[in-house]
Amino acid sequence: MRQKRRAWTRTIEKAKAAHWKEFLDSTGEGYLWKAISYTRARESYTSIPPLRRGTEEIQDYAEKAKLLIETFFPNMAQPEDEAHTEQREEIPWVPITEEEVHRALQAAKPMKAPGEDRLPMLVWKQLWQWLNKVILRVFTASVNLGYYPEQWKRAKIIVLRKPGKPDYTVPGAYRPISLLNTLGKVLEAVMAKRLSYYAEAHHLLPITQFGGRPGRNTEQALLVLRNAIDRAWLSSKVITLVAFDLKGAFNGVNRDTLDRQLKAKGIPTKVRTWVASFMQNRSASISFDDFESPICALENAGLAQGSPLSPILFIFFNSKLVDQPVDFHGGASAFIDDYFRWRAGKSAEENLKKLQDEDIPRIEQWAQQTGSSFAAEKTELIHFTRKKDEQTRGQLAMQGATIKPSATAKLLGVVWDRELRWKEHVQQAVKQATKANIALGGLRHLRPGQTRQVYQACVTPILDYASTVWHNPLRDKRHLKWLDTVQRSALIRILSAFRTTATATMEVETYILPTHLRLKQRAQNVIVKLYTLPRSHPIHDVLSRARRRRDNVGARCRFPLAESMKTMKVEQLTGLETIDPTPTTPWNAPPFVEIDIKADRDKAKENATTLLSSPGRVI
């Protein structure tokens, strides 16, 4: 009997292993990435514990829901009357076209979590050929009437933990995600595309805003700051930076203030009226554990988290805040709601005086005029200098709180330290990559080629993120030593090699670049892409200065981008084609009548042969 039980167990294990191998080897790469999703860490305890409001402990689900709603949507101050601002001429409105709606629908994820209607986007994708005219009429009427339907304003709020918080009995340790009706999100995507086109084609947004815009990313925003620090250090100056935290962000947007900003930018009246309707009279239920609250009105809803329209509206909302020039005396950079301002001076005290006397009052005035508020307790202050006596000097006062200099500051995913040694950032990257590497190691029966693909797609991006900001390809040997530990452990797993096998041998066998060559190649690719951007892009000032620094044979260069340029022939990049990221006119007809993409290679080849033999143009 014991032998039969063992045989039965082995048979089941073999069947499971065979099924898993068949799953991994299935046609298409989608199955491999689905398998990778199984390795993502899941919280061991997802229930919301009793919450604290002051000294009171709340255990009742309904009371928890009420407290979370109050935390997510706090009462905001009423905005003050703003002085008259110059207004642009209103941009003409062009009616929504069927092609616009179809493109927005195609771009949406088919199985995105639906809202109250429980209809995933896949339903509308499948029904488009029959309902296209009806949907277009509904969308057109919504914009013409300036009315956003009430049923599309009802959200189901899912409560998620903010990772890394020390205490989850505090309501502020959670964040809301709004699940919205999918058809409404299609219209929101159409309007977001329109606003993005207006912003880029008519230059309505400050150049210091790098978030939610085509042709811009976090690495560019950080390179602007890195360039400013290098320039200041060459003149023996100190850079003092303040990273501000805006309370509520999307939820804290005041409807009247946003309307004034849109009007000043010349946004069509129809769009402004529709946006006002989109923001008002919103309601939601809140869901956590096995509890879902009744639908209640949101008095201070702001912009819905999870709406494709919210990011572009928010950067219109805070455009005045982030509109600061970048020069020898200081600058600013922003990515959606992440905003940091810096000053350059001969000493930290000089910088603090300018920040306290000029910048803090301006920021507080903006907050009063817009009904916003900043979280002083989350605001970070740091002095960038290698002069030890300057690193901890002074403090700032904001909203009755004192802000003291810190040793590090995390800006857009990169940990900055006072002396730009980058030890803390590299250690964080290695820790995160190691965690991902170990999790991926739990996938059994992967072929070496699949394991290699998974490593390059899921682990190396964690290590290499924004490497042109912190990695000097000609000098940073200490960083490479730490980064190599992750690659070595991955190589051993890919090849099932002995732990004594040389790293260089395994890199040759797997055809994986050594870490220093991978980072060098990435830096060169980033530089090439930056050179394809238009001359009006703010990164070109950084590129021009980095090129001059590359040719400087004097003092030691501390600017990684300039050092990366030494590894390539930059002169040959001046002839590259300029790729304008400005969106094309959304309402124009597409250049191709039909684009047919098949999931199967053989079917695609057969279909291409059929199309080539038919009349009409095929590319």
Image (tube, rainbow, N blue to C red):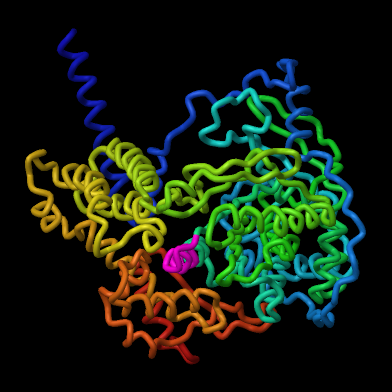
Relative depth, front residue between 271 and 414:
414
Relative depth, front residue between 207 and 601:
207
Query: Which quadrant does the N terminus fall into?
Result: top left
Residue 153 x/y as whole percent: 80, 49
Q: Is residue 494 left or right of residue 102?
A: left
Relative depth, front residue between 6 and 236:
236
Q: Is residue 517 left or right of residue 137?
A: left
Residue 455 x/y as whole percent: 29, 50
Q: Is residue 511 left or right of residue 167?
A: left
Question: Is residue 427 highlighted in magenta?
Answer: no
Report the residue at 83% width, 44% height from top: 76
Which quadrant of the view contains residue 405?
Answer: top right
Which quadrant of the view contains residue 278?
Answer: bottom right
Give the magenta part as a residue range: 226-237
Q: Is residue 57 above or below residue 459?
A: above
Report the residue at 69% width, 66% height from top: 192
Report the residue at 83% width, 47% height from top: 282
Residue 380 x/y as whole percent: 58, 45
Query: Which quadrant does the C terminus fall into?
Result: bottom left
For the view shown, which residue lies furthest in the top direction?
Answer: 1
Q: Is residue 142 left or right of residue 59?
A: right
Q: Is residue 23 above or below residue 521?
A: above
Question: Is residue 231 highlighted in magenta?
Answer: yes
Report the residue at 22% width, 20% height from top: 8
Q: Is residue 72 above or below residue 448?
A: above
Examine the residues drawn in magenta and state their main secondary structure.
helix
Residue 582 x/y as whole percent: 59, 79
Relative depth, front residue between 242 and 333:
242
Residue 563 visible = yes
Q: How many marks?
A: 0
Residue 35 visible = no
